Amino acid sequence: MNNNSENRYSKEEVVTKGGITYLKIDMKPVKGVRYSTYENGQLSEEGNWIDGKEDGLYRWWYENGQLKWEVNFIDGKEDGLLRTWRENGQLIHEWNYKKGKKEGLQRKWYENGQLSSERNFKDGQKHGLHRSWHENGQLWTEVLYRDGKEAGLFRSWYDNGRLLCEDNYKDGKREGLYRSWYEDGRIMYETEFVNGTGVDKHYYESGQLRWELKYNDGELISEKLWDESSKLVKDETY
């Protein structure tokens, strides 16, 4: 065992049972710094432990020495800002935690540095505005969450800025009018739901109706399908 005053222990000197990490030599909960290294001697991870649980700053590295992950723990649970990086040093994620649960703003980036997504959480659940972007910076999706469920208008765009779809949600269920468009602006889907009941229509690019699905309380009850010449090729009731 390492007898430095810092109380540093390699990963091989400890064992984890029931969520608590112990020293193999005497099976006492770890108190100090636990670490591990790559074959080249470079640190792969290092963090502080108290009473057998992560407590304080914890870090992981790539074999080239670039920082990979960084997060703070309190009593074995993530608490504060978690950040991750690519091997070239580019930031990937910034997530916020409170007592082991996601809390507040969470962000992610593409390899080109463009912001990929922003999401908000409350007590571990999606809550607030969620947005994502195409790699070229164009807004991709936008939706509001309340207590983990979609609430209100959902919108999505093509990477050229044209509107792809609009949908409405209430307590996580589709409610009201949903529409989507082909990239040239012609209608693709058209649906209207009330309490999970409604009709879903899909059109060919020519504008001809392709299928019609009917739902009752979220369950599919009938289905019709037409070919591009308007011939009915399927008519099923469930």
Image (tube, rainbow, N blue to C red):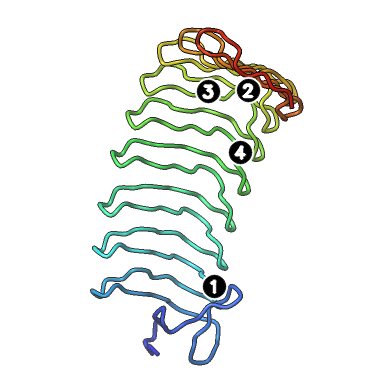
Reading the image, the residue beneath label 3 is 155
Name the element at disc 4. Answer: loop
Can you tell which quarter of the image residue 177 is in?
Answer: top right
Find disc 4 in the rendering and name its residue: 127
Q: For residue 53, which numbered disc appears in the image?
A: 1
Name the residue carrying label 2: 168
Amino acid under disc 2? Asn
> How far across and how far down the image is residue 231, in percent?
57, 9
| Earlier sequence position, callout 4 versus callout 1 | 1
Q: Secondary structure at mark 3?
A: strand
Name the kind of residue labelled 1 in the image.
Lys
140 left or right of 97 in image? left
> What kind of residue is marked 3?
Arg
**Mark 4 and 3 residues: CB-CB less than 8 Å, in contact?**
no
Q: Is residue 231 left or right of residue 197?
A: left
Label 4 neighbour load within 10 Å: few <14, some 14-19, many 20+: many
